[in-house]
Image (tube, grey):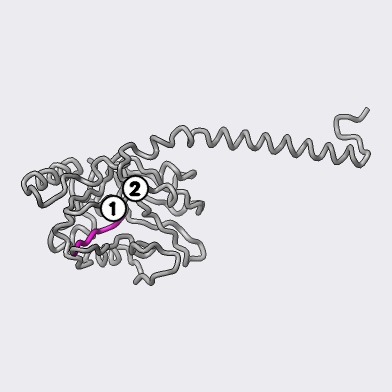
Amino acid sequence: MSVAILTDITRCIGCLECVAACKREYNLEVDVPRRWQNNDGLSAENWTSVLHKPGPHYIRKQCRHCLEPACASACPVGALHQTDIGAVMYENDKCLGCRYCMMACPYGIPRYDWDEQVPYVRKCILCHDKVKAGGQPACTSVCPTEATIFGDRAELLAEAHKRIKENPGKYIDHVWGEHEVGGTSVLYISDINLDFLCYKPNMKTSLPTTTEAAMKSVPVAFVGMGGVMLGLNWIIKRRQKLKEGEAPEGDEQ
């Protein structure tokens, strides 16, 4: 079963209970804004945030858990991977600290823990262990207005389209996350445009699909470049020995 979260922006009151629940669940510290943080509330200690837009509108932001995650595709050591329920997990014991995942994510989600001597990438993991045990994410369990709910992805998509159809004029006729960059496990319906949450909102094809050819060429390019560098090193050393009047190895008689 592929699980998902559906957030209805029209129901969110900006209470931040989801943010507090996430912090309690993972013992995250009270976050102090740093100069290197993006202005979206997310950080190594804040895995979910609530953006305030005019209206007022409150938009919860978290890892979207892409169906074909670009972060996992870009990770050269498999520190990020997708589980059978759809959650995109992170294993810090494998991480090289390259931060390719941060550059690859179309939603700008992964954050680096710059305050630690041995920093790691941090982000929402969809409360994977709780869900596997039959529960639901901490954030959805505390929402007082059910603005954000948890369940099977196909069922939540059906619920999202049902609400849009039964309430003409209340919602924009679109489910964010249904198709964007291949689809995500965190879905939204809203009365305002949410394209700002994604760098390329009109892109339907998953990023791993579009970058597959380039990623497959990396090992070949790496080995090829190694061969080129070895060849250049041999040529330079040979010229140096000729200049110094020495017979290069292999030329001696």
The x, y position of residue 162, in whole percent, is 9, 44
Residue at 40%, 46% in the rendered image: 71
Q: Vertically, is 137 above or below 235?
A: below
Viewer-closest of 251 and 52: 52
Q: If the image is split into quadrants, where does the N terminus sit?
A: top left
Q: Visible in this render: residue 149?
A: no
Residue at 28%, 53% in the rendered image: 126
The x, y position of residue 103, in whole percent, is 44, 50
Viewer-closest of 55 and 39: 55
Residue at 23%, 66% in the rendered image: 16
Disc 1 secondary structure class: loop
Proximity of marks 1 and 2: CB atoms separated by less than 8 Å:
yes
In the rendered image, residue 57 lying in the magenta stretch gets the answer yes
Disc 2 marks a residue whose amino acid type is Val
Residue that mark 1 sits on:
126
Viewer-closest of 143 and 136: 143
> What is the crowding at mark 1: few (fewer than 14 residues within 10 Å), some, or many (at least 20)?
many
Image quadrant assignment for residue 13: bottom left
For the stretch drawn in magenta, the main secondary structure is: strand
Disc 2 secondary structure class: strand
Q: Quick check: 100 left or right of 4?
A: right
The x, y position of residue 35, in whole percent, is 44, 68
Disc 1 marks a residue whose amino acid type is Leu
Q: Quick check: 61 left or right of 34?
A: left
Find the magenta span and give its range: 56-62
Image quadrant assignment for residue 43: bottom left
Residue at 36%, 49% in the rendered image: 199
In the rendered image, residue 191 lying in the magenta stretch gets the answer no
Q: Label 1, label 2: how many angstroms apart (C-alpha)?
A: 8 Å
> What is the crowding at mark 2: few (fewer than 14 residues within 10 Å), some, or many (at least 20)?
many
Q: Which mark is residue 88?
A: 2
Instruction: Count up the numbered dots.
Output: 2
